[in-house]
Image (cartoon, helix red, strand yellow):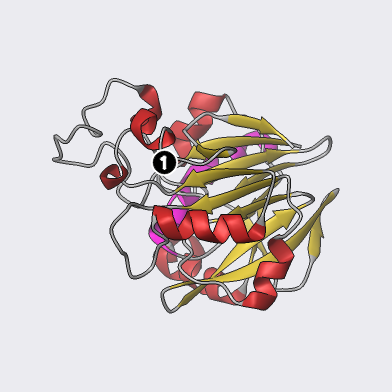
Amino acid sequence: MKITFLGTGTSSGIPQIGCSCEVCTSSDPRDNRLRCSIFVETENLKLLVDMGPDLRQQFLRENIKTLDAILVTHPHRDHIGGLDEIRSLNFILQKPIDIYCNEFSEEGIRELHAYVFRKTNYPYLPKVNFKRISNAPFSIGDLAITPAEVMHAEMPVLGFRMGNFAYVTDCKTIAPSEKEKLKNLDVLVLNALRDQEHHSHLTFAQAIELATELNPKKVYFIHISHHAGTHETRQATLPKNFFIAYDGLTLEV
């Protein structure tokens, strides 16, 4: 399975509009972070996890020209705001794109993109089919997926385990029963926002503590804020086998 990090930044991205801090003005391309998303490829499946507002830029950068399905973690705009960009793939593939999400996320998608779901004969709207999921294991094509529910303050968010790889974004707390789903991993991808306490995201210290408890072979941090410092500086502070992910990074799992 190949994983491509399409975006690794928090909801405002890096550089952040109007900011002239060391990170936002960095010449290191690893410090330029679009909104969080990954692209998962197996022998028979091309899967997008979250469709943020940078989707067009991300697909062009990675030369992605086809897509089988979209998997959604939760309905915040930085994770679902790119739905309109699916139109181009509809034209190429000549079919709707399947979106796998729970009822909560489907409601959020329909609300944010209400124009797509109104009854209209306008032919240039994105075409999608919703595929309802819950917290139970399911499959998309040849890929078996186990959801793990985490809490983003008061909002439930779905992380996803795929084999020995797991992707967890926008997490602050996680119940012991859900932690069990995330053990014995080769790779854990986990959000780590900054050092300062945040009401709905893990700090770096909290993320390191959680990842150490889960004990995967490797950890990659995402959903990075410009308050976290530069990629180079932050990477130097991490334990062995802990890494800062960056846009365009690819992994074979």
Which secondary structure dominates the residues rendered in magenta?
A: helix
Q: Nearer the viewer, residue 71 or 11?
A: 11
* Left or right, 168 with reference to 252: left
Q: Quadrant of residue 106?
A: bottom right
Q: Give the residue pinned by disc 1.
A: 54
- Whole-percent x and y of residue 169? 51, 57
Amino acid type, mark 1: Asp
Is the residue 30 above or below the residue 74 in the image?
Answer: above
- Whole-percent x and y of residue 125? 50, 51
Q: Is residue 199 magenta?
A: no
* Left or right, 100 with reference to 143: left
Is the residue 233 above or below the residue 167 in the image?
Answer: above
Task: Look at 41% across and 41% down and name the residue there.
Answer: 54
Q: Nearer the viewer, residue 91 or 68?
A: 68
Is the residue 165 above or below the residue 148 in the image?
Answer: above
Region of the chain picked out in magenta, as a range = 76-93
Task: Look at 31% across and 44% down and name the residue there.
Answer: 228
Q: Nearer the viewer, residue 116 or 32?
A: 32
Q: Nearer the viewer, residue 133 or 253?
A: 253
Residue lying farthest top?
27
